[in-house]
Image (cartoon, rainbow, N blue to C red):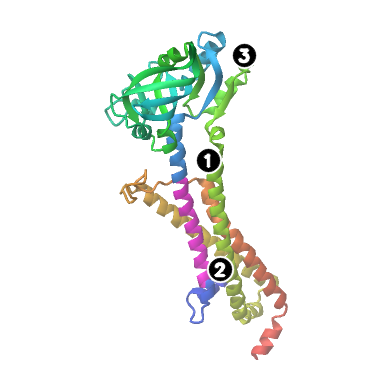
Amino acid sequence: MSVSFFRYFLSYIFKSRTRQKLIFIAIIGLLISSFSLTVLQGIMGGLQSGLIKRSKNVLGEGYIELKQLNQKSSQYSELIERLIKEKIQYTAELELELMIQNDSYVSPIILHGIDFDQFTPGFLTKKGESTPVDTTHIVIGSELGQALRAYYGSKLKITSPAHTDILLEEIPRQVTSYVSDFFSSELPEIDSIHGWVRLSFLQNLIRKKEVNKIRIYSKDNDKVLSILSEKQFEGFHFVSWEKKHSTLVWALNLETRVMLFLFTSMSVLIGICITSGFLIFYNKIKVDLASFWIIGMSKDELFRLIYIFGQGLAVFFCAFGVILGVLFLMLLDSNTIAIMPEQFVERNIPVYFNSMQILLAFLVPYLVASLFTHYTFKIFRKDNTSFISHIKRLG
């Protein structure tokens, strides 16, 4: 009986000559809403994850602050041994904020001194498929090189205002180096200010055999935190990429919340259409429900089935929209055709989605539709307490 009930009213909505176009438009709106939310989350997730990945490729998953610890100290040696034992990729580096000059062009620079013989980060390993990055002298970001009008082999003067020599008065220390290569992270905030050089070069500048950071490139931050929780490493502090770039993380999260708010608002408009559509639909089928009551179905059973019918429509079309959205994202992800303008970093549309995003794409339109469907059903049930009156009016 339940199957016949659902089949009858489905045919009434989609096949009947007197079918209600408003409710049809509303449930199609649910499908479009869940489909759009799935696709938008997937594309936004791809853009956001791509930005974060490019930044982490250069700056790592985080770093351990050492506050200029001597490389010969026992505490430093113990920490390095533990990192090697746990198979954590790291670079011990000396990071300094300096001034760099090429002829009359001057710019600030964050210079990272690392030991290339120990470990070289991936972005400095290859500049293509076969050409290694030349780390003989200084490697600077492409935008910084453009700002300095520097080319391969350009002689650069590097000044450290924090380190001085006394010759009649305090004079900032200066060293010179040559541009051996450029790197591009495709992020202006990195390419315009960062540079990499041999660790010994910067240690000669400050005249101390020290490092002030251990940059972590392995993704398992929990291992690093567990190591630093040990008693002998109490003075060390781990700064994750997310903490260092908390403003960016907050902005990306805000972007996601605004998107969900807009789609929730759109779903409310669809919910209003659902209310109007179902009220008209219920008014049309009052006599049909009385007919089901006459042939033996109880009133409570009829109301229960009509409630399930309304909720089932919302579930089906929201789920169907999510499935179509996932299929569309998979099609985009498999398509390698460059459809974006040349100004964009990624020429094909990036895609990233997970189970939580799929769940949100289903729940946001469904919960709104479910609330309006429930509200409409309560109005209908309150106004239709007696089927006998409908039969008398028909007679």
Q: Quadrant of the C terminus?
A: bottom right
Q: Residue 37, image x and y in percent? A: 50, 55
- Which comes sooner in the sequence, label 3 or label 1? 3
Disc 3 marks which amino acid? Gln
Where residue 332 appears, as percent x and y from the top left, is: 37, 51
Q: Please name the predominant secondary structure of the magenta segment in the image.
A: helix
Q: Which mark is residue 209?
A: none
In the image, is residue 80 part of the stretch drawn in magenta?
no
Please name whichever residue, 249 or 293, is drawn nearer the observer in this view of the structure.
249
Question: In the figure, residue 235 lies in which quadrant?
Answer: top right
Q: Is residue 320 left or right of residue 141?
A: right
Q: Which residues are magenta?
A: 24-46
Q: Which residue is mark 1?
A: 248
Q: Earlier in the sequence, mark 1 or mark 2?
A: 2
> How far apart are the alpha carbons under marks 3 and 1?
33 Å
Question: Which residue carries the number 2 mark?
Answer: 3
Relative depth, front residue between 251 and 330: 251
Using the image as rendered, state which of residue 184 and residue 47 is in the foreground. 184
Residue 43 within the segment the image draws in magenta: yes
Q: CA distance from mark 2 to mark 3?
A: 70 Å
> Circle 3 sits on which residue?
232
Q: Which residue is drawn at the image coordinates 54% and 44% (left, top)?
A: 251
For mark 1, give the secondary structure. helix
Residue at left 54%, top 9%?
73
